[in-house]
Image (cartoon, rainbow, N blue to C red):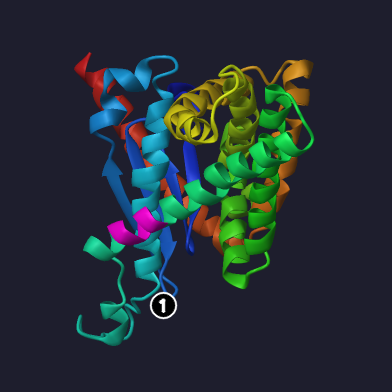
Amino acid sequence: MATDKLKLPSYGGQALLEGVLMRGSSYVAAAMRAPDGQVVVKSEALQGIYKSKIAKLPVLRGLVLLWDALVLGTRYLVESANAQLEDNSSGESTSSPQKSERIEGAALYSTVGVSLLIAVGIFFILPVILGDGIGKLISASEFWRNVIEGVIRLVFLLLYIWGIGKMKDIERFFAYHGAEHKTINAFEAGVEMTVENVMQYPLEHPRCGTGFLLSVMVISVLVFALLGPLPLLFKILSRLLLLPVVVVLAYEYMRWTANHLDSPIVRILVKPNLLLQRLTTRPPTPDMVEVALTSFKAMLQLEQGQATATDTAK
């Protein structure tokens, strides 16, 4: 397998509902298992911000990751949810009840908007209020109030992940997450990409978004500590305004650790990220790995075709 033609850090992915999304530097592909058992593949070229100068500039390129999670990832997640409402083998008309339940248009943007507001409220605004209140109660310094706020935010995140992980549908979602990791790990090991080989590889991966969330939590404490004492309202506003800064710093940290895993110190630093992934991954079944492999191979074929076209043009 020609793993030397493409930069491995350019590969990423995410779990979908009954599917997996794989993203390269120029293309993205998603494979989803439809209710009739068939694997449906969708792909597209990455344009716009992915090919802009921002995507190549240190620090600012983290904004691409934020866009990727909020826009591209959400769009395919909704696409996979809609796919589960369509039974392609039933031959139903588009006016069927299942078809009318599709999430699209205004309903899609409203759902995403409300979800973001709830997430910001629970994971950013509420920890600020609680951290400030507890800090005043125990007469803590501003630094320790930021630490308390960060701990509360992390506890909320862990409880949320642990709680939703008990739901049957989310357990399957986490299993597809594990399938995505195993597939990337197998590719980076250079083995033949078969279901049997991929099943042998670890569930954890150092570039996982779960670890990225933990990095955001830790870095946010350090960044917010630099602001000094602030009134509660300004403190809340500062968290919201500085969130993109925290995200890009966390991205650069994750990128740096992923490129220096041969260092014993870096391997120690990424341990908490890998441990946290035990909450967001489950051992996948072979049919789940088959879906992840289908997605990865579709993306890889497009990426290699792009690389061949570029070499020919030269």
Q: Is residue 142 magenta?
A: no
109 horizontally vs 168: left or right: left
87 horizontally vs 155: left or right: left
Q: Which residue was labeled with disc 1?
A: 36
* 101, above or below 26, in the image: below
Kind of residue at disc 1: Asp
Q: Residue at x 35, y 79 (%)?
A: 87
Where is residue 193 drawn, in percent x and y?
55, 44
Q: Nearer the viewer, residue 158 or 4?
A: 158
* 284, above or below 12, in the image: below
Where is residue 200 drawn, in percent x and y?
71, 48
**What is the crowding at mark 1: few (fewer than 14 residues within 10 Å), some, or many (at least 20)?**
few
Q: Magenta stretch: dominant SS?
A: helix
Q: Is residue 262 visible?
A: yes
SS under mark 1? loop
Q: Residue at x 56, y 40 (%)?
A: 209
Give the residues in magenta: 109-114
* 159, above or below 221, in the image: below
Q: Residue at x 58, y 64 (%)?
A: 170
Q: Residue at x 48, y 37 (%)?
A: 12
Where is residue 151 drawn, in percent x and y?
71, 38
Label count reads: 1
Q: Is residue 204 visible?
A: no
Q: Quadrant of the C terminus?
A: top left
Where is residue 192 drawn, in percent x and y?
58, 41
Q: Nearer the viewer, residue 301 or 228?
A: 228
Q: Quadrant of residue 62?
A: top left
